[in-house]
Image (cartoon, grey):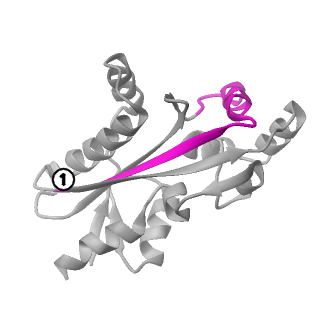
Amino acid sequence: MKIILASKSGVRKNILENNKISCNVIPSNIDEDQVKEAMLNENATPKLVSKNLAELKANKVSEKRPDELVLGADSVIDLEGKLISKPKTREEAVAILENLNGKKHQLISSVCISKNGSMIWNYTDASTLTMKKLNLDQIKSYLDNIKDEILYAYGVYQIEAGGRSLFSKIEGDEDTIMGLPVKQIKEYLNQFK
């Protein structure tokens, strides 16, 4: 089974390959911030933002590669109904972690498979994470160990790296937390074998 992954995420690519789904990577290069802003102006929920971004990414690449299956994915943080986006600066990263500090939030991951420029399947899953109560020095110390390109590409925590240490409780599917609910993807793709 070979698909196209409409994402630059190395983590998502690894999850697919570890599950014996080979993929070519063709990033969609959509302006996520512009889409998020427009949707939030229409009072869209974080879940709807995640779902629509995954679909938009898959459809955009699928239009260029019509007969192939294209997988788009997106993950967002939902803190008490408010969308938390990836940081653009170190200061924003500190502010995000201070905002999540000691609280429970949801990490929502959506996936979409498109063919011929249209969605043919989608799935959204949410995990609940409870962050430990940390002081500012602990937050800064954690962030000091994350390279800029990883921080700005993947957000303020990576469960597969040192991010697990930030949480007192993690409820949900590990792959969903890393941005790709692969079990459901595999179940859908099995019909094409």
Q: Nearer the viewer, residue 171 or 16?
A: 171
Q: Position of residue 118 (x, y in %)?
A: 13, 49
Q: Is residue 189 magenta?
A: no
Query: Who's the residue at 40% across and 71% down the image?
Result: 183
Counting labels gives 1
Q: Quadrant of the C terminus?
A: bottom left
Q: Position of residue 74 (x, y in %)?
A: 41, 46
Q: Is residue 75 left or right of residue 171?
A: left
Q: Quadrant of the N terminus?
A: bottom left
Q: Is residue 113 visible?
A: no
In this rendering, the answer to whether 10 lies above or below 92 is below
Q: Position of residue 50 (x, y in %)?
A: 38, 41
Give the magenta range. 87-114
Tell me which corner region of the image, top left, top right, bottom left or bottom right, holds residue 91. top right
Q: Nearer the viewer, residue 181 or 23?
A: 181
Query: Who's the residue at 48% across and 55% down the image?
Result: 179
Q: Secondary structure at mark 1?
A: helix
Q: Position of residue 173 (x, y in %)?
A: 52, 63
In this rendering, the answer to whether 111 lies above or below 138 is below
In this rendering, the answer to whether 183 lies above or below 156 is below
Mark 1, other Cα within 10 Å: few <14 / some 14–19 / many ≥20: many
Tell me which corner region of the image, top left, top right, bottom left or bottom right, holds residue 49. top left
Q: Is residue 102 magenta?
A: yes
Q: Which residue is mark 1?
A: 62
Going by the numbered disc 1, the residue's amino acid type is: Ser
Q: Is residue 13 visible?
A: yes
